[in-house]
């Protein structure tokens, strides 16, 4: 059932949103002349890798000019890219990953290999889940870029505190997930993007399954 919903929704969304995609691609291209799309290796279900699609939001070669984490105010982010990140429109090309079966609409956000290499045996259980475009952890930690920017060592903060908390949230959610709860996550994601003041309600809802997991690091969201 989950795969049927993924295929149907991603195909319909791509059909309806292709004019917007063309406009975004054109804006990215005109911004600095670089490619409109960016593909990055992420870890798939089972521990393999796949290429995740995004609209490019950073300067060409950004990965060679700094850390893999992107914090608020990162100078590598382009003007167009800042808008796309704020509205999450840079994630739209991942509908192709969903259609191809590499991702799901709802599932743990796929990590880069360097951070997956840090997982302990318990945390690797998250690799049994299909990665997704949105998940409870992304809602709970939606604004993490600001907190990372305030840290002396953003990568250590992420690896030692935020990443383990996200894994706990996603494993707790997966233990009770069904198509109705997935619809709730999708609805909360849309609400957080479109409705002012909705963000706090989604944080409370999405963090409930994991109890106190991650409270010490606040509400943040990684975009790398």
Image (spheres, rainbow, N blue to C red):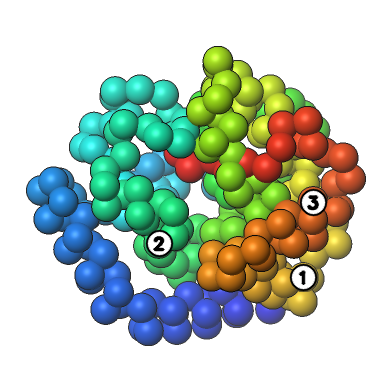
Q: Residue at x 57, y 21 (%)?
A: 151
Position of the C terminus by quadrant: top left
- Mark 2: secondary structure: helix
Q: Which residue is mark 2?
A: 89
Question: Which is closer to the viewer, label 3 or label 1?
Answer: 3
In the image, 15 versus 102, the foreground residue is: 15
Total numbered circles? 3
In the image, 167 versus 200, the foreground residue is: 200
> For this view, does 177 lie left or right of residue 87?
right
- Across and down, in percent, residue 134 comes to 59, 59
Other-residue count near label 3 (Cα within 10 Å), few / some / many at <14 / 14–19 / ≥20: many
- Across and down, in percent, residue 94 comes to 43, 61
Q: Which residue is mark 3?
A: 207
**Within the image, what quadrant is residue 148 found in?**
top right
Whole-number angstrom distance, CA of label 2 to CA of label 1: 23 Å
> For this view, does 176 lie left or right of residue 62?
right
Other-residue count near label 1 (Cα within 10 Å), few / some / many at <14 / 14–19 / ≥20: some
């Amino acid at each position: 059932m989950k795969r049927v919903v993924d295929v149907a929704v991603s195909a319909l969304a791509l059909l309806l949103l292709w004019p917007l995609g063309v406009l975004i691609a054109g804006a990215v291209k005109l911004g600095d002349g670089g490619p409109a799309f960016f593909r990055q290796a992420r870890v798939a279900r089972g521990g393999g890798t796949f290429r995740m699609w995004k609209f490019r939001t950073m300067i060409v070669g950004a990965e060679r000019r700094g850390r893999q984490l992107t914090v608020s105010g990162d100078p590598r982010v382009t003007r167009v890219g800042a808008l796309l990140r704020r509205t999450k429109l840079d994630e739209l090309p991942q509908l192709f990953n969903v259609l191809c079966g590499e991702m799901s609409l709802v599932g743990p956000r796929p990590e880069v290999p360097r951070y997956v290499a840090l997982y302990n045996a318990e945390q690797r259980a998250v690799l049994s889940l299909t990665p997704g475009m949105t998940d409870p952890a992304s809602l709970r930690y939606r604004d993490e870029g600001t907190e990372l920017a305030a840290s002396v060592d953003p990568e250590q903060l992420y690896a030692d505190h935020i990443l383990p908390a996200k894994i706990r949230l996603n494993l707790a959610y997966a233990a009770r997930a069904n198509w109705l709860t997935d619809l709730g996550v999708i609805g909360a994601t849309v609400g957080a993007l479109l409705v002012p003041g909705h963000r706090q309600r989604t944080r409370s809802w999405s963090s409930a399954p994991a109890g106190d997991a991650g409270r010490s690091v606040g509400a943040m969201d990684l975009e790398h």
